[in-house]
Image (cartoon, helix red, strand yellow):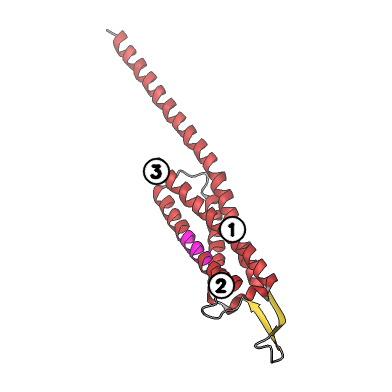
Amino acid sequence: MQQKPAAAAAAMAVDAADDEGVRSHVKVIESAKRRLRWPFDGVVRFLGLAFTLIAAVVVGVDNESKIISITLTKSLPPIHFFASAKWQYMSAFKYFVVSNCIACAYAAVSLVYSVATRGYKDDPMRSLLLVSFDLIMVGLLFSADGAAAAIGVIGRDGNSHMHWIKVCGFFEGYCHHFTAALVISIAGSVMFLCLVVLSILNLYKN
């Protein structure tokens, strides 16, 4: 009769050990997932920060000035005047610079936050808040890129119906720099889009 309580106690001890082993194994797996997920999240946020910063700086310092000659008719001499190309002259370019600055600042703050919380257990509400801001940055950047690209196409090709001349024919250096900044900004937009996809997958797995 005394062997039964001892056997039951031993069985309970084995079950408890098994449960503890399972919990320990789950903790190890969760910790490994966080270690694998965080470097990717941190690297993508850093790339988003770098791309948006470079795009904003390139457009912010880009300007070109020169004397332009325009011939109205063959019977009249050409008209010479001094002209400058700056991002402040177009609302779409202002929106482009400001949007990239906002995204860059957010990327810096979210990167610090991601580094500070990398060892903590995933919180669905925190992840949902982060993916919401990431999604806002995606919309902001892609809208700014689209608006700037539309003005850039007009500057490159002009518009015969509206009698708009090809500005890039006069300011080639300015247009080349802006094109490079636009490509870099699109790359930053893709980085934020990758963050959104990663966060959604993490929320789905949780």
Instruction: Return the residue found at the far front.
Output: 75
Considering only vertical position in the picture, is 131 above or below 163? above
* Residue 139 part of the magenta-drawn span: yes
Q: Is residue 102 visible?
A: no
What span is colored magenta in the figure?
136-145
For residue 93, say whether it is visible: yes
Q: Disc 3 or 2, which lies upstream in sequence?
A: 2
Please say if 183 is above or below 168: above
Q: Nearer the viewer, mark 3 or mark 2?
A: 2
Check residue 154 in the rendering and tell me which mark sits there, or answer none.
Answer: 2
**Which secondary structure, mark 2?**
helix
Residue 73 picture location, percent across and down: 66, 88
What amino acid is labelled 1 in the image?
Leu
- Rendered residue at 42%/27% (across/down): 22
Q: Position of residue 54 (x, y in %)?
A: 64, 62
Mark number displayed over residue 49:
1
Report the quarter where the N terminus lies: top left
Which sits earlier in the primary sequence, circle 1 or circle 2?
1
Q: Which label sits on residue 204? A: 3
Q: Residues within 10 Å of mark 1 (few under 14, many from 20)?
A: many
Residue in the image at 60% along x and 54% along y = 47
